[in-house]
Image (cartoon, grey):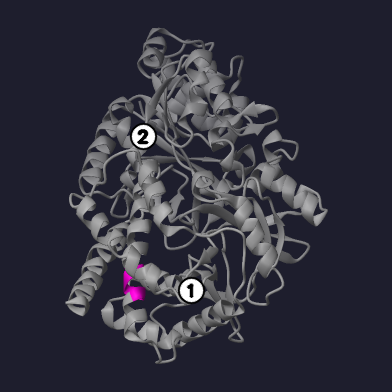
Amino acid sequence: MNNDKYKILKVLIENPDLNQRKISKLTNFSLGKVNNLLGKLNEEKYIFLDYKLALNGKKYINLHHPKQATILAAGYGLRMVPINTEEPKGLLEVHGEPLIERIIKQLHEVSITDIKIVVGFMKEHYEYLIDEYNVDLIANPYYSTRNNIYSLYLAKDRLANGYIIPCDIWFEDNPFSTLEDPSWYLFSDRLTDHSHWQVSKNAKVKYTKEPGNRMIGIAYLNQEDAEVLTDHLDEMIKAKKYDSFWEDALADKKQFLISGRIIPNSEHAEINSYEELMELDSHSDHLKTEAIQIIEETLKVDKTKVHNIHTLKKGMTNRSFSFECKDKRYIMRIPGEGTDKLIDRKEEYDVYQQIKDEPYTENILYLDPTNGYKLSEFLENTRNSDANDWNDVTKCMKLLRRFHHENYQVNHKFDIWKQINFYESLRDAPSVYKDFMITKENVVKLKPFIQDNIKQWSLCHIDANADNFLIDKKGKIYLIDWEYAGMQDPDLDIAMYAIYAGYNREQFDRLIDIYYQNDCDELTRYKIYAYAAVGGLLWSNWCEYKQSLGLDFGAYSIAQYRYAKEYSKLVLNYLEKKNA
């Protein structure tokens, strides 16, 4: 059946008691074209003269009734911060109804009950849907490292005669139907720079260098197009194109594989951010997160004054976002998964109480010593220091030396040896490194040498890496993020800067010379090397623990283990020759 006759038949099924004028209005066809198409449908025994379904029409509907639906709900929804710290975005409520439940109910309205949901982040929160709506869950174990193309790949065997649906979409009217024939992808009539696909009047999707129609994420696939899409998914996953979105599999060079369908932008809402949820339903209970309540109470504002929320680069320990309120920017830190096992927030609080008046750290407005939520003023017009720019490095070491000379004292220490064993115990499994026990034994042998050569014992930053030094346009430098700080040997901070920067031996020596202003004795230099080995083992164990939670830090984890391995040997060889 051609597309025009399909449109007429679909309108007749969905809207009983129509006349030609109403059909013309609903299809945007002229009255003459409507009359002609109705005549052909009657001749071909799809409809009777009174527009009721005839035998061929009933057969056609049975053959082209959508059979199933796949809902993609595995991702973090990072732009939903701070909401996504408490609930996955598919379960956000709009007018008292979770987004995914509304989608399921709309599918049920058109008699689609074969529904599978691909889950990942906070997957357990979706479990109740199995009993409530008789759906099935497909678990995506790689939701944190692969985009939604992998989620759809996991459901590739059930795409024919079915819908693909994102979980974060809200429709005022039901977008699904009891009758579908040609495949289609849903676009909005709104144009955006984020899309380079434009839908023509005849539903063809064409590539454009100009702003294209906004891509909504819903599609219907018939048998033939589902097979093509499945082949594309297989090819892309085989090529490890995990950073792709599933829609990329619909494109072949600059050709879009299926037709486009347009709806007015006003008829749907895509909930990708806190502000979009606020705009759709300002009374949603999910707007009342702990982070937002802290902001309201601390800044003495209503949540409607919080805007321009942006997720910051995901840290190794925390999730943070910046926002604007009354023409000023702030940062809210939300502790990451498992952080409570790694950091004593009361100790962090005590550190900030010591240094809060220093001009080189951030202005903390709120810090909860029990859970680690932190609200601070945004340091405007600053950038992270560059560990490969020696002018920056010189500024960092000058500030670090100044801090160390102030000799702050707190009531807790950062016991690096205890922390090494603690992180090792947290992973609850043997190390992935085959020679780990040998490396650890070598590192532990350095302990007496280090302890015999400590000259100062004061508050240290511990995580004094280049990213935690900020430099503004006037050259002023700041040191932020003191959550690991405690009493230690200041030389440890030098080693930590080096191993985080990935310095080789030559760069390491240059760093030491900058800090010590070319006046570092040999024993101290080798003690700092020893700290590089100890710090490498510490962060290697830390990485292994975090990886057990599904977080991967790539080459950083291997680099830390290499520092433990190589610098422990370096110092042990030095000590052996010295004591010979």
Q: Secondary structure at mark 1?
A: loop
Q: Quadrant of residue 347?
A: bottom right
In the image, is 232 to the left or to the right of 406?
A: left
Crowdedness of circle 1 by 10 Å Cα count: few (<14), some, many (20+)? Answer: many
Q: Quadrant of residue 147?
A: top left
Q: Is residue 231 magenta?
A: no
Of residues 52 and 252, the one drawn nearer to the viewer in this rendering: 252
Q: Residue at x 55, y 50 (%)?
A: 79
Q: Main secondary structure of the magenta part?
A: helix
Q: Secondary structure at mark 2?
A: loop
Specify the amino acid type for callout 2. Answer: Asn
Residue 579, image x, y percentages: 21, 76
Q: Residue at x 54, y 33 (%)?
A: 90
The correct choice, above or below, for 294 with respect to 32 in the image is below
Specify the amino acid type for callout 1. Answer: Pro
- Seen as rendered, the residue at the extreme bottom is 518
Location of mark 1 (residue): 490
Q: Residue at x 65, y 55 (%)?
A: 374
Residue 105, image x, y percentages: 56, 20
The correct choice, above or below, for 120 with respect to 476 in the image is above
Of residues 194 and 140, the one drawn nearer to the viewer in this rendering: 140
Task: Determine if residue 181 is in view.
Answer: no
The part of the chain drawn in magenta is 527-532
Q: Is residue 528 magenta?
A: yes
**Figure quadrant of the N terminus:** top left
In the image, is 513 to the left or to the right of 321?
A: left
Residue 108, image x, y percentages: 52, 17
Of residues 127 and 266, the one drawn nearer to the viewer in this rendering: 127
Location of mark 2 (residue): 140
Task: Determine if residue 296 is in view.
Answer: yes
Residue 321, image x, y percentages: 60, 56
